[in-house]
Amino acid sequence: MDVKEKLENNNEFVKSKMIDDAYLSFSFMALISVILITFRAFEIGFTLSYFIQLPISLGVLITYSNRNKLSTNHKTYILIIALILILISGLYNFGFLASTKHYLILLPVISSFMLSPKSTVKVFIVLLLIYSGFGLAYIKGWLTLNINPNELVVKPSTWLVDIFVIAGSSWIILRIVRQYYLDLNNQYDTIAKINEDLSDKEEKQRVLFESMNEAVFLLENDIVIDCNAEAKKLFGQKINKELISNIFPRMQSSGRETHLIWNEKINEIKQGIKPAFTLNLITNQDKEAICDIGLNQLELKHHTYIQVIIRDITLRKKREDELRQYRIELEKRSIELQLINEDLKKSNEQLQDKNLDLENTLDILNKAKVQLVESEKMASIGILTAGVAHEINNPLNFIKTGLYGIESIIEDDELTDSTAIKQEIKSIASKMGIGVDKVAEIVKSLNHFSRNNQLEFQKCSLNKILSNCLSILNHEYKNKVAIKQTFLKNNIELFGNESKLHQVFLNLILNSIQSIETTGEIEINSKLHQNEAIITITDTGKGIPEAFKNKIFDPFFTTKPAGKGTGLGLSIVMQIIKDHHGDITFASAEGKGTIVTLILPTAQTANARKD
């Protein structure tokens, strides 16, 4: 319910209450009047006014007892008509001496509280016409008094009736004025409460207005009257009195001029339509933003305003476009998948007929998978073979040279001194022994590497494993890389598969060697920490590019040229380290080198686990 309705309802209540008070007062006066005019009738005789005023008074009493069944307007008009009839009857019998002439003053006063000003004037004019008409009738002699005024003046009842009418009329006026004053105070309190409610409501509306996530403008004749915080945030200094002057680009992406679209929408809202549309607008950063715009016409305090609600949907549009494009791609992929699915169904039908062949093929693939995993080891064996061939070649040359020297001594006729011969042969034999020892050492190292005890874990020497690997790779780093070994004096005993650990360190050291393009240095360091062996291999090679760091352990990933690597080396190294309950990490900077850190359990740790 709005303020106007509340005030109207309150006025209607006040008016109804005043009518009921007037009814009560006149009912009381009617009761007393009936008694008084009856006594007066016995004194001066029963006149026409008595027979008119008596039923009217009784009628007022009856209608008062049934007032709840009558509307406010009905009660008002009944009361006014009753008083006018009483006035007429009094003027008819007593002329200007009639006590009812006081109603000429009472009726307009009552009417002013109960009727509109226009209706009150009409009542007053009717009363003047009635009084003037009776005055003219008595002046012209059309009407005459049936009683002697001198006799009427000396009768007590005459004065009593007049006193009662004057007092009653005055009391009624005072009562109605007092009631009106009280009701006016109530009305004031009501208005004050309404104003308080309106202020509270206005404050809430302002908070709601300012807290909206959309930019909101209030326009009157295209002039900005007000805007919220979000509007200032979105458009900033571009807001001025004319909304469209700064934030509207001249043309839209559709090719239409912005002001033409705006005028069309303003015309729509004047026709009772609430348009919602999308425009490109210029934000406070001089960037075009896609915005949803809603227009609404408001009536506030007899003024017509247009409410403009703007929401920036640039990001949402971008996401919608991306989703639309993604949906198109999905539809394309779906069609492709349907085609592939159809091909797969056909292939499946063919494969069902060749189930036995498929099983055989799967067996072959499984074997190929095992062979592929082992191929990296075979690659390592190739390196071993090349190293062994290179390293054995020198001691064999020693042996060949010795044999050739012995043959020369035997065939030399000039050498007759047995002592000289023995000394020469002893020297040659010594050199041959060095070559044989070298071959034995290489073969021993190769034997450690080539053992096929895949499931056998035992104690093994870390220093020996590293020394064997360096011996085998000697031809790879000789004259190119300086190897710096910092091993513990007390040998570290690992618990693991010696052959596989050889494969790990051979792979890692070889990678470090191959990362050094010209010359450089590799440092191998080992230490103990809490019954775990920590081995670091540091090189000064070219390092690992940032883009490849997350892929170095992926199977088949390699940065080497085609034919130079399988891409399984580090993947197998990782698997072997996991099998040994160890860990491996890489720290590398491109162009600065790489540090590989391995953590392996010692034999002591393995014994603790068993316990």
Image (cartoon, rainbow, N blue to C red):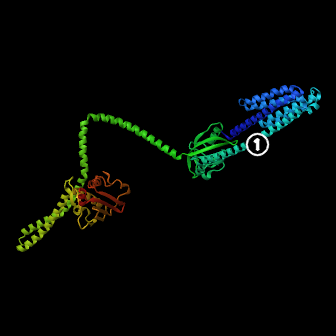
Q: Mark 1 points at which residue?
A: 181
* Front residue of this view, candidates 409 and 488: 488
Residue 488, percent from left and from top: 25, 66
Say if 288 sits above or below 79 in the image: below
Residue 61, percent from left and from top: 77, 29
* Front residue of this view, candidates 369 and 117: 117
Q: Residue at x 73, y 32 (%)?
A: 72
Q: Which residue is drawn at 76% across and 42% down?
A: 181
Quarter holding the C terminus is: bottom left
Q: Does residue 88 show up?
A: no
* Front residue of this view, candidates 274 and 478: 274
Q: Does residue 409 show up?
A: yes
Quarter holding the N terminus is: top right
**Across the whole image, how many numbered discs are drawn on residues?**
1
Choose top left, top right, bottom left or bottom right for residue 156.
top right
Choose top left, top right, bottom left or bottom right for residue 270.
top right
Q: Residue at x 32, y 58 (%)?
A: 585
Instruction: Tell me the amino acid under the disc marked 1.
Output: Tyr
Say if 477 sits above or below 345 in the image: below
Residue 315, percent from left and from top: 51, 47
Say if 393 sits above or below 370 in the image: below
Say if 174 sits above or below 150 in the image: below
Residue 320, percent from left and from top: 49, 43
Does residue 480 appear to the left or right of 245 in the view shown?
left
Which element carries disc 1, helix, strand or loop?
helix
* Front residue of this view, candidates 316 and 592: 316
Does residue 79 appear to the left or right of 576 in the view shown?
right
Does residue 28 appear to the left or right of 241 in the view shown?
right
